[in-house]
Amino acid sequence: MLGLKNYLAGGLNLLEDTIAAISTPLGEGGIGIVRLSGPAAFDIAKKIFRSKKKEWSAAEGHRLVYGHILDPAGQIVDEVLLGYMKAPHTYTREDIIEINCHGGIVPSKKILELVLSAGARLARPGEFSLRAFLNGRIDLAQAESIIDIIRARTETGLKLAVAQLNGSLSRKILELQDRLLGLLAQVEANIDFPEDDLEAATGQELLRTVGELLEQVEDLIRGAQAGKIYREGIRTIIIGRPNVGKSSLLNALLRENRAIVSDIPGTTRDIIEEMINIGGIPLKIIDTAGLHETENIIEKIGMEKTREMINRADLVLVVLDAGRELVAADLDIIGSVRDKKAVFLVNKDDLAEKKISVEELDVLAAGRPVLWVSAKEETGLDELEEKIFEMVMGGHLSGTDDALVTNTRHKQALEAAQRHLTDAVAELKKKVPVDVAAIDIRAAWEALGEITGNTVTEDLLDRIFADFCIGK
Amino acid sequence: MEYFAGKYDVLVVGAGHAGCEAGLASARMGCRTCVLTLNMDNVALMPCNPAVGGPAKGHLVREVDALGGEIGLNTDRHSIQMRLLNTAKGPAVHALRAQADKKSYQAGMKQVLERQPLLDLKQATVERLLVEKGKVCGAVTSTGARFEAEAVVLTTGTYLKGRIVIGDLSFPGGPNGQFPSVGLSDSLIDLGLRLGRFKTGTPARVDAGSIDFSRMIIQPGDDITHNFSFMSDIDHREQLPCWLTYTNEETHRVIRENLYRAPLYTGAIQSMGPRYCPSIETKVVRFSDKPAHQVFIEPEGRNTSEMYVQGMSTSLPEDVQLAMLRTLPGLEKVEIMRVGYAIEYDYLIPAQLTLWLAVKEIPGLFAAGQINGTSGYEEAAAQGIMAGINAALYVKGREPFTLTRADAYTGVMIDDLVTKELDEPYRMLTSRAEYRLLLRQDNADLRLTEKGYQIGLVTAERYKMFERKKTLVEEEKNRLERTMVPVSGEVKKVLEQMKSAALPQQGASLAGLLRRPEIGYEQLLQLPLEHPELPPEVREQVEIQIKYEGYIKKQQAQVERFRRMEEKKIPYDLDYSQAQGLSLEAREKMEQVRPVSIGQAARIAGVTPADISVLLIHLEQKRRRQTTRQD
C-alpha cells in the first residue's frame, strides 16, 4: 500500500516530523490557511516569512503577525497574516504556525510547496487530529471520530491517488521507477552474486543512466511548476454571436467568483482577460466580447484569428440564445470548435418562449455538455462550475501532453527523488563505488514508491531473479 | 520403555551449523547443555557446497564470530582456499568466501563441542517434545531416553519428514543418505504449531580422477591469507584451486529432451524451491537464450577425490545426470560418486517465533536454522547462536537478547523471518539490509563484541583485543584529522606521483587528503611525516570510516529515526480485535506476528499507514483508561 515501508525505511518519522497541510477547503472561501505543526514549525516559517517585525516569534503565547511569504528567489508570493502558537497550548500540543493567505488554490498551494521544500512533510489524512489525541489534547470520547476521519479520508485519498495515477504522469513515473529498479537490480545482482558471470555496471555507465533519469525527474517537476493549470489558469474562451449575453454571463461568473488577478501585465487590452476561480481552479477567461460588442466577431477579425484564439484555448464556452433558432453564424461558431473541449451554454433560460432546437443542439454538441443558464437570473452557474471542475479534475482538460503533476504529494516525492539522484550523480563523479551510489539510487526509487505504493526489497529481488540467471 | 536419561538446562536437538552454535553459546554462558545428533559422524555436516561465506553470508559469519561463536574460527582452521570477493566495490560489500575441507571441518567442530565444558554430545533421534502446563520440559528419543531440560532448541535442518527425489525415484530420507526425522514433525503439529514445506537440491559429486582439468580454467585462491575470525592469526595456508567450465548447447539439449522425466516439471515436486539456487533444468528452461552456464568444480577436501559440481544442482534421473555432465569440457569421461537430488522437508512457519527465536506459544522452546525456513550454513549458524544465547538467558531468567536491522545482518534476517511471509527458503542477501554501509563485515566486532561481552559469551581475551583495536582506531582518526600537511616541494612531488591535485595554500589535514578518491591510507604513508605502526585491520577501519564519513552519517541519521519507531512498544498480549478501525487484513496479520513495536508492525505486508495511526490511537486509549483506573 502507499508506501509506509518506504516511508519508514527512508527515515521519516510518523510522529516527530513537522507536518503541513492546507487546512481550508480548496478553492473555497476568501482566505486559505496553511498549517504547520511540529518541532520545526517556527524554523520553517522563518525561512519563508518576512515581516517588519524582525523578532516576530519572540513573544510568548499566541500572536498574529502581518508580512509576506517569499520564494527562494526573494519574490513575494503573497501577503499574509501569520499566526503562531507555542506549544503546549495548541491544538496538537506542538508548535503551530498558521499562514492565512489569499483564498483560492494558487496562493495556498504555492505556500504549501514552499514549506515542504523548507523541511516540512505533507500531513497524512487526519494527522493533526491524531497528534492532538496522542498528545493528550483531545479526550477519549473523540478518539473514535478521529479513527473515522483517518479511515474515510484515507479511502478517498487512495481513490484520488489512483485516479490521478491514470494517464501520462503515472506512465512516466512507472517508467522511471522501472528503469531505476533495472539499474539497481544490475548493481545488486553483481554484489550478491559476484561469481555469476553477470554483466557489471561500471560507475561511468551508472553515472550516464542516473544523469538521464535525473533529467526526466526534473522535467516532470518543471512540468508541474511551469505547467500549467494552477499557475496560468485554464485558457478559456467565451464565444458567441452578438447579444447572446456573453458579457453578462462573464460578469455573473465574476460576481460569484472573486477575481484573483484582474489585470495581467503584458497582455493586450484588445482582449479582456479575467482570472476567475472555480472550485479552486483558476480559469483565465478570454472574453471576445471585449472586442466590439456590436459587430460579428467572425466578420471583424476574420476566421483565421478566431481559429487561432480557439486553438490556443483549453476550453471553449459557446454561448447561444435560447430565444432564437440556431442561425448560420451560430453554426459557423459551433463548426469552428468541432475538435475542442467545449461547454454549450444556452443563455436566457429565463425566457418563457424558447425557440432553440434542443435536438439539433444535442447533435451538434456531439457528447459535450449542454447547460441551460440565465445570466440575468444568475441560474445554472453552479452547474457550469461543477461541470468545469469535473472536466479539469477528471483529466479531460490538459493543455499539453506533458504529464501534469497536480498532487502535491506526488511533487514532494518527485523532489525527494531528485535530491537523491542529484546526490548519486555527485558521488559517482567523485568515483564512489557503485554499491555506495546504489544507496542513493535506492532512496530515489523509494521516494517514487510513495506515489506508486511499491516496496523496494521484494520488488528488487523479483527483478534480480527475473533479469538474471543466478545461482551456482 | 521410557527411562530418565538426564537433566539439563538446555537441550539442543540437532548438531548441524545451527545446533553447534546454539549448544556452544548455551554452555559457554554457563548452562548445562546437551546436544543431540541423529548421527555422531555427521556433526557440522555440509551436505551441500563445501564453502562458507560470500556476500551477506560472510557478514553473518563475522557477526557470529564477533559474538563469540565458532563458525569463523573453525572455517579458518579447515579452509582449503579463501578469496575476498567484490574487492572492486565498496567496503560494505567486500565478502570473504572460503572453500572448506568438509571432513576436517566436521571433525574440528565436533572436537570443539566435545571439549566444551558443561556440554554433552549424544547420538539420538528425538521423537517428541515434552510439554507440561504449556511449557517445554524436555524430549523423548526413539530409544525411550527421556531428557529433561528447562529449554529446548530445535535445530533439525532439512530432516523433518525429509523426502528425497531423484528423477522418478522418491523415498523418505534426510540429506546425504541420512534417515529423516518423522516423529518430531507430528509432535510439533500436535503441539499446535504450523508447518510449511520447502524444497532444495544439490548437484552430483564426481571423481577428480575422471576429470581432465586441462580443459578447464583454474580458479586459485587469493595470494593474501585471509581469516574470518577476528581472533585467528593464521598467516599461511596451503590452498587448493577450484576449476571453471561451462555448459553448452549439447548439455541443454540433453536436459530439454529429458524434461519429461524432471520432477520439477512433471509435478512430482510441488513445494517451492529457492530462486537464488535454481536447478540446472530450471536455468535452461527459464533462460533458454543463454548459450552457456558457468560450472565450478570444487574440491570437497584435501583427502578425498570427491569434487562438488557447483551450478549443476538437479533432481533429474541418475542416467540423465551422467549424460549431461559428460557434455561439459573436461568432464567427458566423468564418473559420478554421489548422485544429485532434490529434498523436500517440513519447516516451522517462522511467524510463530519471536525476535529472539522463541516459539511464541510454547515457553522454553526455541528454533534455529533450516527448520525456520532458511537455507545456508551461515544463516543457520547466526540463528543458532541467537537461539542458544536466548535459551540460556531464559533459563537464567534474564531479558531476551535481540539484534535490530540497524545492528546486524543477523537482525535483518530474524526480523524478516518473523515479520514477513516466506515463499521460498530464505537466504541472506546484502540487498535485504537497509543500512548496508553501517553493517560491514570489517566492523562486525565494533558492532557486536561489546554486546557479546555483556551477555557473557565473549571471552575476556577477545574483549581486551577488541578494546585495543577500538582505541587505536579512534586515536588514529584523531591524528589524521589534526595533522596538517604543510605545503612543500616534497609533498607536491608525492601528490603529483599519485595524480592528485596540489594542496591549497593553507595546507590540508591528512584526513582531508584521505577523502580524495585517489588516495588511500597506504598513500598517506608516503608523505614525509611521521606515521605510527598500525595493524592492517586498524588502518582499514580508519580509511573506511574517514572515506565514507558522509554516507555513514546519512545512514546513521536514518537509523536514529528507525530506532524511534522501534522504541514505540506494543504489548505482546494486545487484543487486536478491540482496536476499532483496523482493517481485517491488518488485524489478522498483526495477530499472527504480534509485533513488538510500531516499527515492526509497519513492516508487515498489508499493514497501511492508516492502520498504524489507528493502532497508535488504540494504544493511547488503552493507556489513558488504565491511568484512570489507577487513579
Image: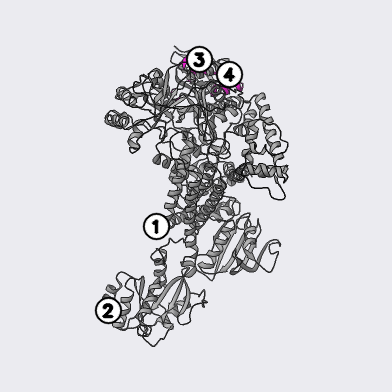
The three-letter amino acid code for the residue at tag 3 is Lys
Q: Is residue B283 magenta?
A: no
Q: Quadrant of the C terminus of chain A?
A: top left
Q: Chain of mark 1?
A: A
Cβ atoms under marks 1 and 3 closer than 8 Å: no
- Residue A351 seen in render: yes
Question: Whole-Å distance between the Cαs marked 1 and 3?
Answer: 65 Å
Q: In the rendered image, which quarter is residue B114 located in? A: top right
Circle 1 crowding by C-alpha within 10 Å: few under 14, some 14–19, many from 20: few
Residue wearing tag 3: B122
Whether the residues at callouts 1 and 2 have beta carbons within 8 Å, the answer is no
Task: Name the mark on residue A357.
Answer: 2
Q: Position of residue B221 (x, y in %)?
A: 51, 27
User: A289 above or below B268?
Assistant: below
Q: Which residue is mark 1?
A: A166
Residue stretch in magenta? B21-49
Q: Quadrant of residue A375?
A: bottom left
Measured in 3D between alpha carbons, the distance from the residue under mark 1 to the one under mark 2, in whole angstroms, is 38 Å
Q: Secondary structure at mark 4?
A: loop
Q: CB under 8 Å between callouts 1 and 4? A: no
> What residue is shown with label 4?
B32
The answer to whether A99 is drawn above or below residue B559 in the figure is below
Of the pair B391 and B203, the residue shown nearer to us: B203
SS state under label 2: loop
- Secondary structure under the numbered disc 1 in the rendered image: loop
Discs 1 and 2 carry the same chain letter: yes
Label 1 or label 4, whichever lies nearer to me, is: 1
